[in-house]
Amino acid sequence: MTKRLLALFAAMAFILSAAAKDTHHAHTAPHGGTLVEVGEHQFALEFVRDAAAGTLTLYVLDGHAESFVRLSARTIEAVLEVKGRAEKLTLAAVANELSGETVGDTSQFAAQADWLRREGEFKGRIAALEIRGQTFKDIAFGFPTNEDHDE
């Protein structure tokens, strides 16, 4: 009986320690893009590239990447490193008649650049972004994977 209790306690301790170590929450990007965590699991940014159009679209989402979060910003500035060169990208607010989003009250931002037609791999940084009254600084990300920049 004592051996069984010890084995049970050992198994429970193992399970609890494994659960405590799993602090990373995996979420699915709604548009199939690259998710970037902002804050301590407060918000997420999703980056989606359309190679044919040469566009990069950014969606602002809640921490679970389930609901859109509207911003009053008209643009979001990003600096991208593409094959060793710096590219500045201004993502402009996008109005969406279906969702009722307007410039100045939207969760979607987009930019077009010819180099986005050719280049699908880069690192980026947003110097500052205000979301729901909080300013987040120095948001780093990788594209198409964000492995190097996960917090």
Image (cartoon, helix red, strand yellow):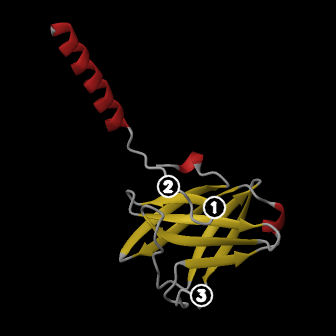
Q: Secondary structure at mark 2?
A: loop
Which is nearer the N-term, disc 1 or disc 3?
1
Does label 1 or label 2 sit earlier along the sequence?
2
Q: Which residue is mark 1?
A: 33
Badge 2 amino acid: His
Which residue is disc 2 drawn over?
Answer: 27
Residue type beneath disc 1: Gly
- Badge 1 marks a residue whose secondary structure is loop
Give residue 23's quadrant in the image.
top left
Residue that label 3 marks = 96
Q: Given the image, on which type of amino acid does mark 3 rest? A: Asn
Q: Position of residue 77 (x, y in %)?
A: 59, 74
| Residue 70: image location, x then y, percent | 46, 80
Q: 67 and 123: which one is in front?
A: 67
Q: Counting other residues with Cα less than 10 Å from the Cα at mark 2, is it few (<14), some (14-19), or many (20 or more)?
A: few
Q: Examine the image and state in which quarter residue 9 appears.
A: top left
Q: Residue 100 placed where, x, y %?
A: 52, 90
